[in-house]
Image (cartoon, rainbow, N blue to C red):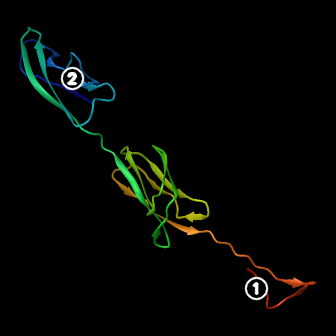
């Protein structure tokens, strides 16, 4: 974050800025040129900071102005969804997030999952996996600009066994195989 404070009037040319009372939040500085900026991760979000700035012109005239700086919580988004099998939620599915941020989670008892705290503008791909199942295609979100849903449909992998029961090379009828 960065903004430049301005002053009107005064004598001569140029101004010098300073904090005359109170303190800036952790992670913020005010340059003598009036640039108020964050130098890293600022203090806790949703907190107000009150301080007074002083501006001095080239003729040593001064003026002060009380300011309040409110640190807003960063904007983040989520990608969430449900994994279903035959219309019902499927638990124990590993859901993987890759791209700008990564992570894995498992679906709950209703097949639901969620990735939260995702940075806006990021590119993300979500996939689902569990042994014995296939899943609908991975879903990709480029330039994330809001909360998104990524639902998956699972299909149980099934196998068939076929063959012939024989005795001395000849087919045998009426046999039940269990």
Q: Is residue 10 above or below residue 158?
A: above
Residues under labels 1 and 2: Cα distance? 84 Å
Q: Residue, x 48% and y 45% (percent of image)?
A: 102
Q: Quadrant of residue 28?
A: top left
Horizontal side of residue 6 vs 171, given as left or right: left
Q: Outermost residue toward the top?
A: 59
Disc 1 element: loop
Query: Residue 39: x percent and y percent?
Result: 31, 24
Query: Residue 36: x percent and y percent?
Result: 22, 24
The residue lying toward the viewer, choosing from 57 and 70, is: 70
Horizontal side of residue 23 vs 157, given as left or right: left
N-terminal of the pair, mark 1 or mark 2, is 2
Label 2 environment density (alpha carbons within 10 Å; few <14, some 14–19, many ≥20)? some
Disc 2 element: loop
Which mark lies nearer to you, 1 or 2? 1
Q: Which part of the image, by quadrant, shows the C terminus?
A: bottom right
Query: Residue 175: x percent and y percent?
Result: 79, 87
Query: Residue 65: x percent and y percent?
Result: 9, 23
Q: Is residue 75 above or below residue 9?
A: below
| Mark 1 vs 2: CB contact within 8 A | no
Disc 2 target residue? 24
Horizontal side of residue 17 vs 11, given as left or right: right
Q: Is residue 35 above or below residue 135?
A: above
Q: Which part of the image, by quadrant, shows the N terminus?
A: top left
Q: Is residue 19 above or below residue 88?
A: above
The residue lying toward the viewer, choosing from 49 and 99, is: 49
Q: Residue, x 21% and y 15% (percent of image)?
A: 32
Q: Quadrant of residue 163?
A: bottom right
Which numbered disc covers residue 176? 1
Q: Outermost residue toward the right?
A: 168
Q: Residue, x 76% and y 82% (percent of image)?
A: 177
């Amino acid at each position: 974050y960065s903004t430049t404070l301005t002053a009107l009037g005064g004598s001569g040319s140029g101004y010098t800025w300073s904090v005359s009372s109170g303190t800036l939040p952790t992670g913020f500085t005010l340059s003598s040129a009036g640039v108020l900026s964050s130098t890293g991760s600022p203090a806790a979000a949703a907190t107000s900071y009150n301080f007074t700035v002083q501006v001095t012109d080239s003729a040593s005239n001064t003026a002060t102005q009380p300011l309040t700086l409110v640190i807003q919580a960063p904007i983040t988004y989520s990608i969430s969804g449900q994994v279903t099998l035959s219309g019902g939620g499927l638990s124990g599915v590993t859901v993987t997030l890759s791209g700008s941020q990564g992570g894995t989670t498992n679906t709950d008892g209703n097949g639901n999952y969620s990735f939260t705290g995702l940075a806006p503008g990021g590119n993300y791909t979500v996939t689902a996996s569990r042994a014995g199942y296939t899943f609908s295609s991975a879903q990709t979100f480029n330039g994330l600009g809001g909360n998104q849903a990524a639902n998956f449909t699972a299909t149980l992998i099934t196998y068939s066994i076929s063959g012939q029961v024989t005795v001395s090379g000849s087919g045998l009828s009426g046999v039940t195989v269990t």
